[in-house]
Amino acid sequence: MQQTIAIVGTGRMGANMARRLKDCGYRVTAVFDLRSEVAKSLADELGCQTCSTLAEVNSLANIVITVVTDNSAMDQIFAEHGDSLLQGAKGHTFINCATVTPAIHREIARRAGQRGANSLEACMASSITQARNGTLYLMIGGEFTVFESVQGLLASLSDGGKLLRYVGPTGTAAEVKALVNMVMNINTAGLAEGLGLGAALGLDLTMLREVFSQTGARSGVLQTDGEDMQNRAHDCYFSAAHAAKDSGIALELAHEAGLHLPLAEATRDQYLKMVKLGLGELDKSGIAELTFPGRFPVGH
C-alpha cells in the first residue's frame, strides 16, 4: 500500500516536518489543526487538503503524524467517543511526536490497537531548524515490526536514519525523552546561574563562555543558549512553559520510582516561576532573566 501522510498539529514542528516529507517525495495529503487558518496556509503551500474533522484525516491518509501539546490534547484527538482519529482507524499507523507521559502513549496504543490500528512514539530531541532540514534526533517506542514498516519515512526526518533510534516498547521513548529534557533543563538553569554570577562579578561574558566551552562547564545548552542569555535574545524554539511541563513529567516518573530529585525540582520551580510571571512563552534561555542582576524587578 502506498504511504499517504497527514499531519495533525501544524505548529512550527509539525509544519516543518510536513515540508521536509514533501521535499523527500512523500505524499502529504492532509493537515489538521484547531487553528484552521494555520492549517489552511500550510495546506495551500503543500498542495494538500485541510481537514475540518479528525475523522476526515483518516479518510485521506494511512499514516498520521501527530504533534500536539500535552496529555490532554493527545487524549482529545484519540477520544473514544465523538470526532477523533480512532474513527476509521483500521489499518492506519499513528506516529505520535509530542512530549507527553509514558502512560498516555500506552493508553493511545491500547485504544488504537482495539480499532485495528498501530501506534508509535517518535519523541524528538531537536528543534524547528532540524525539523525543516530532516535532522531530528528521534527516539522510537512501540512494536518493532511497526517501526520497520515506517522506518524509511522516519529516516527522512532524521538524517537518513543516522539520528534514528529504536529504544523499546511503548512508553520507553517517552521515559527517555523525559530524562533528556530534565537534564537539559537543569543544565540550562545552571548555565543561567553561572553567567548571571559572572555578570554580577563584572566578568566579560564572552570570555567566560569561551572558558566554559573548554572546561568541565561545557554543555550542549552552552552552545545553543549561552550567547542568547548574554544578549537577552529569547526567540522561542523551546518555551519555558514546555520546559516546566517536561521537567514535571520526569518528576512524576521519579515519584513513581521512589526517588527524590532536588535539582530537577528546583529547575521545574524556576520555569513555573517564569510562567507565573508571564514569561512562559520565552525560549527556555529566558530563565536567565531570573538570574542576571538587574534584569527582573527585585522581589519577584
Image: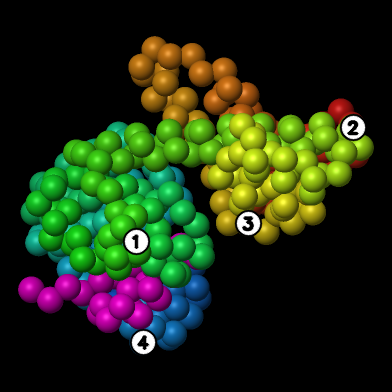
- In whole angstroms, how far apart are the C-alphas of marks 3 and 4? 28 Å
Q: Is residue 168 above or below residue 135?
A: above
Residue 140 at x, y percent in the picture:
27, 48
In terms of sequence position, does the residue under pointer 3 or pointer 4 come before the other? 4
Label 4 belongs to which residue? Answer: 47
Residue 169 at x, y percent in the picture:
19, 38
Label 1 belongs to which residue? Answer: 158
Q: Is residue 137 above or below residue 34?
A: above
- In whole angstroms, how far apart are the C-alphas of marks 1 and 3? 22 Å
- Which residues are drawn in magenta? 1-27
In terms of sequence position, does the residue under pointer 2 or pointer 4 come before the other? 4
Amino acid type shown at disc 3 = Cys
Pair 1/2: label in front: 2
What's the mark number on residue 74?
A: none
In terms of sequence position, does the residue under pointer 4 or pointer 1 come before the other? 4
Question: Circles 3 and 2: CB distance less than 8 Å?
Answer: no
Residue at 43% across / 86% down in the picture?
A: 44
Label 2 belongs to which residue? Answer: 201
Residue at 91% across / 37% down in the picture?
A: 202
Question: Circles 1 and 3: CB distance less than 8 Å?
Answer: no
Pair 3/4: label in front: 3
Residue closer to the observer: 188 or 52: 188
Does residue 55 appear in this view? Answer: no
